[in-house]
Amino acid sequence: PMYFLLCNLSLVDICFTSTTVPKMLLNIQTQSRVITYEGCITQMYFFLLFAGLDNFLLTVMAYDRFVAICHPLHYTAIMSPRLCGRLVLLSWVMSVLHSLLQCLVVLRLSFCPDLEIPHFFCDLKQMVQLACSDTFLNNMVLYVAALLLAGGPFAGILYSYSKIVSCVLGMPRAQGRYKAFSSCASHLSVVSLFYGTSLGVYLSSAATHSSHSSAAASVMYAVVTPMLNPIVYGVRT
């Protein structure tokens, strides 16, 4: 199950960086920072899709580690190929619906003819802020989705690791505790990178109100984190 989930995470990370990096490199090469409205909406859709998938897959992997450590004798029975496939399919369905909903509410907005987005990709929040029409519905959908689809999985990860810690501390031998914690090291590193950089982007944009610093910080979770994920798991494996 762990390697099946790793394959899916690697695929999602490749697709995640492919939504922004090629266009960014092309802009640098051609010294042209132009994107069509259709291209912007498409880029935003796939960015939200793969960012959400990263989030859900990390939650599924946290549940995998919880079952492996807290219920080792039932691990193969609980984490069956059928359940793993359903969890990954559910992650895809929820991510597709979420990104589709966000793009549909953006399509109802009106924009000025010549619009400059102070970012290296079409960021949803920047697009909403630059709209010329009422954005109340967009902001409501944005914050409710962030609460449910980011806060929910993060709470699930915290709950899984609270159970893991209590289970590991109850082990009688130090060697067993070390082995259990070491099996979670890669996942903890990736989770810390993903949520740490995302939180850092939010705090930096709220504190400085500078579009350039926000765009620079966004590179961390949009480019650097997906690049480091396979390195972290590869070195550990």
Image (cartoon, grey):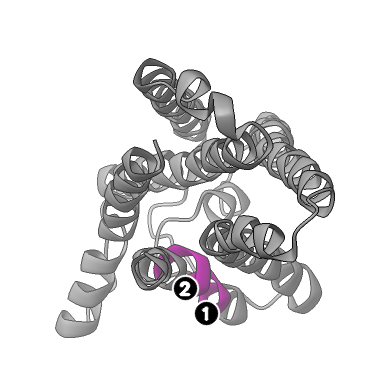
Outermost front residue? 173
Taking the image as shown, residue 59 lies to the left or right of residue 157, namely left
Residue 87: percent from the left, percent from the top? 46, 23
Q: Residues within 10 Å of mark 1 (few under 14, many from 20)?
A: few
Amino acid type, label 2: Val
* Residue nearest the viewer, comparing 160 with 90: 160
Residue 199: percent from the left, percent from the top? 70, 63
> What range is drawn magenta here?
215-223
Q: Which residue is mark 2?
A: 219
Q: Does 210 appear in magenta?
A: no
Q: Are marks 1 and 2 in contact (CB under 8 Å)?
A: yes
> Would you identify the image quadrant in which residue 226 lies?
bottom left
Taking the image as shown, residue 5 lies to the left or right of residue 55, namely left
Rendered position, 2 above or below 152:
below
Amino acid type, label 1: Ala
Per the picture, the main secondary structure of the magenta-coloured stretch is: helix
Q: Secondary structure at mark 2?
A: helix
Q: In the picture, which quadrant includes the N terminus?
A: top left
* Residue nearest the viewer, comparing 131 with 77: 77
Q: How many marks?
A: 2
Residue lying at 34% horizontally and 67% vertically, measured from the top left: 234
Residue 100: percent from the left, percent from the top? 43, 27
Q: Which residue is mark 1?
A: 216
